[in-house]
Image: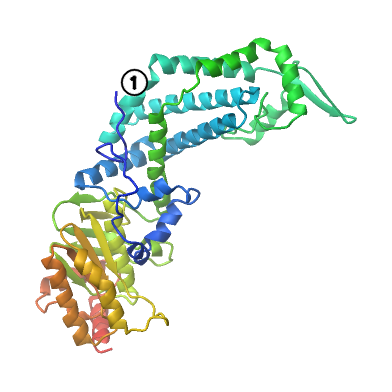
Amino acid sequence: MEYRSILFANGRNTSEADEPFMSDEAMSDLGLDTILDEMLRGRAADAELRRWFRSPLPDSDAVRYRSSVMEDIDERLTLETAEKFALRSRRITDCLTSSEASPGTVQSCKWRLDAAVEYCKAVSEMKEALSRAGLRSDGLTRCSDWISAYATSKSFVRLRDDAFGLDRTFRDMRYNFIATDGLFYIYAGDEEADYCAELRNTFDRDGDSEACLQAISGLQTPGLEEETLRLLRRRYPAAFAALESFSHTHPSFVDPTAMTFAKELTFYIACLRYFRAFRKRGLYYCYPVITQKKELRIEAGYDLMAGTANRMIANGVDLHAEAAVVVPAFPDGPDSFARTVGQIIALSALGCPVPARSAVVPHIDRLYTHFPKADRPEMNEGKLKEELTRLHPIVAEAGHGSMVVLNETFSTTSTYDATSMGRKLLDLLTIRGAMCLFVTHLPGFAPEDRGADIKRVEEEVERYGLTKERLISRLKERAHG
């Protein structure tokens, strides 16, 4: 049974040559650089994992494939099971690294045995978990078929039996170690109580502690450890001979496919751990519907950068056209609203959950943003020229399959000029086939014939605590401000 990637529907991994679907500036505009750092906390140095969060998927089918795997892990396999498998995989790597650091020694052989035990536990536990999960995604279903076939193969069964049997032999070794009067005494074990085990059982209520004394810890403590090993080898010669034989019999037991699976799981673990934290705060997330149409519908979406605030405002979008102009009614509305939409579109393109109660999102291959920038003293040009300079590559590159989020563009000019230039900009982008969302504080920007849109806005605003009269009052204040 051939393994199929759980990240890429066609089984192909992305390469470093793949162009990110959004620039560093766009990442910063939407707060996604901060969000990504939070997701990868503890794994920030993992360049491949970071690249996966920046690389586009080729089509909507690939997005749905990844999203269905994400949902399966979230709701059926469980995040905790995935994390346990990934943890065992890291232990395997650590054990093998320690083994390679002291080749030809007893310690090296014992580290290899420890790695084999962890490996067999990881594969066997994941096989059982996948078979019980009631999976729906194509990616995890095929992975379950592969790991089931592998875990019952003759080579794996032999490895498992050899590793578990030899591990029990070493765990059953007993010896006493006493330090007194500046001397160390090591002698054969007896029927004394194992006080270390009793302490561990007392304080480890979950029963998952690895804090136990082993016959060979792998730590390099010359002299004392070597003498201990010498005495143990004299008392248990058959066990140590079997240990060396195990290393020769199973020189390379890790199937690279299993480690690839563990590596790809880290993508989903990082993402789901991040969103689970929002759920604990009483917020929500969903798995968006990906469409090939130029359609964007968001119900109760929120800005992840403001998700920790005491008062979080949810927003809705219902866009069935190539371009839309939005005039938020709240003081901090434009920035937060634009970030909300941009975050949802970007995360959807990666097959990730999004911060909304529900969402229908078009598949895009490139996301552009244009947000206001703080004045920089070293820039010897006006604000308008600076904006036009940053807009130039967007207009030149955006096309079919692109989404452009414009936030408060031309806001430093007069109302008339901002409105005129903004409409021309939208025309240029939509002619090229790009979808556009223009968020602005200027209520006169939108077309005059917008009665239906006003009715929808009134309904949405009243749902979230504003009255129609307060909304009209705020719009009038801004129009004359």
Where is the N terminus found, in terms of image quarters? top left
In this rendering, position of residue 141 left or right of residue 120 = left
Residue extending furthest toward the right: 181
| The furthest residue to the bottom | 480
Dividing the image into 4 quarters, which one contains the C terminus?
A: bottom left
Q: Residues within 10 Å of mark 1 (few under 14, many from 20)?
A: some
Residue 265 found in image quarter: top left
Residue 76 to residue 21: above or below: above
The answer to whether 284 is drawn above or below residue 73 in the figure is below
Query: Which percent across, then down, holds residue 347?
Result: 31, 54
The colour scheme of the drawn protein is: rainbow
User: Is residue 464 visible in the rendered structure shown here?
Assistant: no
Q: Which residue is mark 1?
A: 149
Q: Residue at the location (60% across, 32% down)?
A: 101
Q: Residue type at mark 1?
A: Ala
One can see residue 418 in this view: yes
Viewer-nearest residue: 265 or 192: 265
Residue at left offset 17%, top offset 69%? 324
Quick check: 164 above or below 101?
above
Between 191 and 55, the residue placed more toward the observer is: 55
